[in-house]
Image (cartoon, helix red, strand yellow):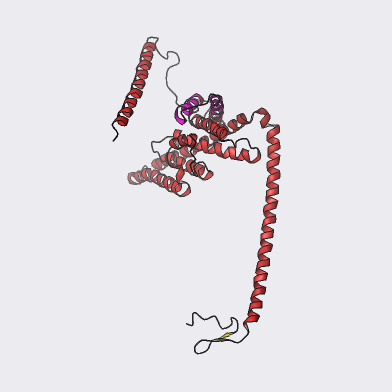
Amino acid sequence: MNNLAPPPDQHAYQHTLMYGRYTKELGAFAKEEARKQHKLKKEDVDLETDELMRIKYQGRCRGRLFKAFGWLWRHTFARLGEDWVFLALLGLIMAVLSFFMDLGISMCNKGRLWLYRDLAKNPVAQYFAWVALPFCLILFSAGFVHIVAPQSIGSGIPEMKTILRGVALKEYLTFRTLVAKVIGLTATLGSGLPLGKEGPFVHIASISATLLSKLVTSFQSIYENESRNTEMLAAACAVGVASCFGAPIGGVLFSIEVTTVYFAIRNYWRGFFTAVCGATVFKLLAVWAHEEDTVKAYFQTNFTMEFPFDPQELLVFALMGVICGLGGALYVWSHRQYVLFMRRNKK
C-alpha cells in the first residue's frame, strides 16, 4: 500500500495510519496544474513553430536549388538531348562502380597471396590464413546483405524481368539495396568464390538508373512516365554487362535476349550508346589509374600475329558454326516438346 501512495511532498499529502489525507484544497492544485500544462503547451507550440520555420526555410532553399538545376538542365542538357545526357551519365557511373569494385576484389586477392607467402615458414598458419580470409569475407558478405537489404540477394536478372513486365517489387531499386549489392558482391568475389559480375551488375545498373531518374525528376519531370522509365531500365541492363567486360555490343544483345520478350527498336541506339560510354570509361579508368599501359582486351590471347591460322581452318570454323547452330535449334525444339508434353500430361 505504501508503494501505491504518492510521496509526502506531493499535493501536501500526509500519511496516516490507514489511508492518509490532503492538508490543502485540491482547487489550488488544479490551478497550479493548469498553469504547468499551459506552460508546457506554449513550449510545445514554440518548438513546433521553430520546427515549421526551419522546414519552411529548408524547403525554400531546396526549391531554389532545384529551380536553379532545372534552369541549368533546360538551357544545357535539354538542348543536347535529355535521354542521351542521362544515358551518358549512367554509363559513367557504372564504369566508375565497376572499376572500383574490381580494385577492391584485386586488393582482397593480393592480400590473400601476401599472407600465404609471408607465412611460408609455417605451413599450418599458411593453411589457416589461406582458408580464414575467404571464410571471413563470405560471412561478412552474407551478414551485411541480410542486415542492410535482403532484396540484394541473388543475381537480380529474374527480378529485373519481373519489373520490366510491369510488376512493382518493394524496396528492390533503392539506395540501401545498391549499397548492399556493391559491398556484398565485392566481398564475395574477393573471397575467390567461382561467381561472376554479369547478373548482379544488371541489377546494380537498374538501381543506378532508377536513382538517377528520381534525381532528375526532382527538378525536371521528364521520367515520371512509367514507359519512359522502363526504357531507361532496358538500357541500364545493357550498360551493366558492358561495364563488366568492356563489350558494348554484347551488352545490347544481352539486354535484348534476357530482359524482355518485346524490345522496342528505339531502345537499340539508347542501349548501345550507354553501353559504349560505360565500356569506354571502364577501359580508360584502368589506363588513368596506371593499372594498364594502354587499352587492352579483357580476355587476351597468345596467337602469333604473323601466322594466326591456316586458310584450311576456315572450313573447320564454318563447320563448328553449323554444328553449334543445329545444336541450339535442337535444344530449343527439345525444350518446347518437353513443355508441351508436361502441359498435356498435367493432372
234 in relation to 7, above or below: above
User: Compared to 300, does 61 lie above or below?
Assistant: below
Residue numbers of the magenta segment: 249-277
- When the figure is inspected, residue 140 is found, relative to residue 275, above or below; the finding is below
Q: Position of residue 326 (x, y in %)?
A: 35, 18
**Residue at coordinates 46% horizontally, 42% vertically from top-left?**
152
Location of residue 334 by image quarter: top left
Q: Residue 270: name its quadrant.
A: top right
Give the image location of residue 147, x and y in percent: 46, 50
Q: Is residue 111 one of those drawn in magenta?
A: no
Q: Which secondary structure is most common in the magenta stretch?
A: helix
- The structure residue drawn at horizontal position 70% and vertical position 55%, both measured from the top left corner, is 53
The answer to which of 74 and 246 lies nearer the viewer is 74
Tell whether position 251 is magenta.
Answer: yes
Q: What's the residue at 56%, 25% (across, down)?
A: 266
In the rendered image, the vertical position of residue 344 relative to residue 40, given as above or below: above
Give the quadrant of residue 63. Answer: top right
Report if residue 74 is visible in the image: yes
The foreground one among 330 and 294 is 330
Q: How many numbered discs?
A: 0
Q: Residue furthest bottom?
A: 17
Residue 314 percent location from the top left of the image: 39, 12
Position of the C terminus by quadrant: top left
Residue 201 appears anywhere in the view: no
Residue nearer the viewer, 305 or 220: 220
Relative image position of residue 119 (x, y in whole percent): 38, 44
- Residue in front for this viewpoint, 18 or 213: 18
